[in-house]
Amino acid sequence: QVQLVESGGGLVQAGGSLRLSCAASGRTFSNYLMGWFRQAPGKEREFVAAISWTGGSTYYADSVKGRFTISTDNAKNTVYLQMNTLKPEDTAVYYCAGGRLGRLYAVANAYDYWGQGTQVTVSS
């Protein structure tokens, strides 16, 4: 059974940093794209960042480019999202997702597996 388990969310002041982790288990993800999405109250789920598990190609939403960094630790089967210079508008539930390579990385429906989400709250 595939599981994606996020951790690392919390409350932080504007300008601060957080690192989210997503521990993956239950299958081989070598041919997969791993993504982070977020959903704020009353808004649709939106793409944040994605990375190919083995190739290392990365993709970012314009709103987080230069502030967030996605990475993987293959030995730990874990995906990270380092979030710096956080803003109140980054407040949302952050979800980790896994989908096959070759699909549209910014589209939520392209991903097969999802974690339960972790709350990130940025105070002003």
Image (cartoon, rainbow, N blue to C red):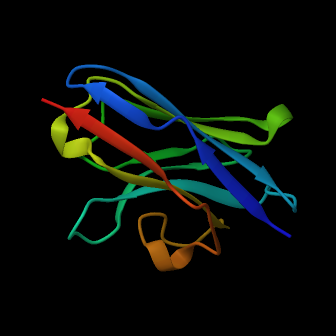
Taking the spot 60% from the left edge, 47% from the top edge, the residue there is: 6
State the count of labels. 0
Of all residues, the one furthest to the top in this rendering is: 16
Residue 104 x, y percent position in the rendering: 48, 71
Q: Which of the 4 quarters of the picture holds residue 96? A: bottom right
The reply to whether residue 114 is in sight is: yes
The reply to whether residue 67 is in sight is: no
Q: Is residue 48 left or right of residue 76?
A: left
Q: Is residue 97 left or right of residue 67?
A: right
Taking the spot 85% from the left edge, 33% from the top edge, the residue there is: 75
Q: Is residue 4 above or below residue 56?
A: below
Residue 99 x, y percent position in the rendering: 64, 68
Taking the spot 64% from the left edge, 75% from the top edge, the residue there is: 112
Q: Is residue 87 left or right of residue 34?
A: left
Quadrant, the C terminus: top left
Q: Is residue 90 above or below residue 92?
A: above
Q: Which of the 4 quarters of the picture holds residue 17? A: top left
Q: Which of the 4 quarters of the picture holds residue 14? A: top left
Quadrant, the N terminus: bottom right
Q: Is residue 29 above or below residue 59?
A: below
| Front residue (pair 124, 15) | 124
| Front residue (pair 99, 83) | 83
Residue 40 x, y percent position in the rendering: 27, 59
Of all residues, the one furthest to the left in this rendering is: 124
Taking the spot 31% from the left edge, 26% from the top edge, the residue there is: 12
